[in-house]
Amino acid sequence: MPVITCIDDLKKLHKRRTPKMFYDYAESGSYTEQTFRENTTDFQQLRLRQKVAVDMSGRSTATTMAGFPVSMPVALAPVGLTGMQRADGEIKAARAAAKFGVPFTLSTMSICSIEDVAAHSSAPFWFQLYVMRDEDFVDRIIQRAKDAKCSALVLTLDLQILGQRHKDLKNGLSAPPKLTVPVMLDLATKWRWGLEMLATKRRFFGNIVGHAKGVGDASSLMSWTAEQFDPQLDWGKIGRIRDKWGGKLILKGVLDEDDARRAAEFGADAIIVSNHGGRQLDGALSAIKMLPRIVDAVGDKVEVWMDSGIRSGQDVLKALALGAKGTMIGRSYIYGLGAMGEAGVTKALEVIRKELDISMALCGEKNVKDLGRHNLMIPRIFRAISSKATNLLKKICKFLPKEFVCRAGVFAVCPRVGRSKAA
Ligand code: GLV
């Protein structure tokens, strides 16, 4: 049994034990992968403030996310094809999360179906919805989530069209994998994965196959997305889904202050600042860089969470200190799942909680709810410009020639000013 001390240890084991096609699926961003990389490296630009001689007994990482009690503010994010990282992967992850006291979110593009996960896990989970063109399918899947007693709907807004991930095309990603010669050679070294897969019947998109009509190639995420996802998703359609669902609604994939304000007015229970793990708009700013701007834009009108790039408890601490009330991890638990199944997901959660708890103590804090910007040294690029300052800058810029605005670097300080000037 290898000694696991950090998330990176799980990642190495995941790579060794999982077919290349699925490891690559998890470990990629779109196009040049700039945003994917910066999601993690930008965390390193934020530094923690050490405090000494502070009573650090009686610490707690427990809090609530959208009213749900959690043992730490870290939910498992929806991840497509989780049941291909390890047989019955969604069930294993849901069980680990339930025992740990954190929420699990099931993706629409999961291998195990909503009903299957509900039948095999002990706690209610959240369901993540992709909006399809087929309204009837959307209505039925919402009803299935209600019947399975899912306690919140996580509506993803940033993937109505798929950002290209080069590796998936090169690997011929599909679920189940097509047994080409390179795939078989790869599988020969991943015998444990293969044996477990042979022993389960859950090898297809469980929420889709048998539930959707007129599906072309249901084994391919890429063709399914192109054919079925609704490119016309707008706030009107989001409203229809909210009414149909009628329960807690979390909007995922917000990366812009105006969108965040809109989501807050709309009455979401929480919004998730996210760029889909760098898998969609390559070139967008990292989620952690956008977080303080969005927190400042919405104030306390809506709970703000973040995902994309969290690989440690210190990262969770930084997100909370910048104002997030909760976080989500995707790859960090997928590494654990691919490495060691359910025990690996538990391990990932344990690693993150321990790192969060110890780092919090060394920052002189006893409770995650007390974390704030006073715990950080924040580089200027992270600083949000308040809406008052933004409006003032906008007014000033109206009287300046465009070239001057750009040359003076106002564009760099506040992209919104540059945009409104150009419009
Ligand atoms: C789906 O959620 C993906 O990012 O592949």
Image (tube, rainbow, N blue to C red):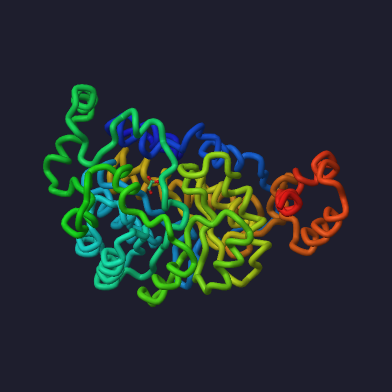
Front in this rendered view, residue 349 or 57: 349
User: Which of the 4 image quadrants contains residue 325?
Assistant: bottom right
Name the residue at 39% across, 68% down.
152
Front in this rendered view, residue 328 or 281: 281
Above or below, comparing residue 103 to residue 11 in the picture: below
Front in this rendered view, residue 99 or 420: 420
Say whether residue 74 is left or right of residue 211.
right
Name the residue at 80% across, 60% down.
389
Name the residue at 20% across, 47% down.
204
Number of callouts: 0
Name the residue at 87% across, 50% down.
400
Q: Position of residue 419 (x, y in %)?
A: 70, 50
Q: Is residue 416 visible?
A: yes
Q: Position of residue 75 (x, y in %)?
A: 43, 57
Q: Position of residue 365 (x, y in %)?
A: 63, 58
Q: Is residue 99 visible?
A: no
Front in this rendered view, residue 161 or 41: 161
Q: Position of residue 283 (x, y in %)?
A: 57, 39
- For the N terminus, the quadrant is top left
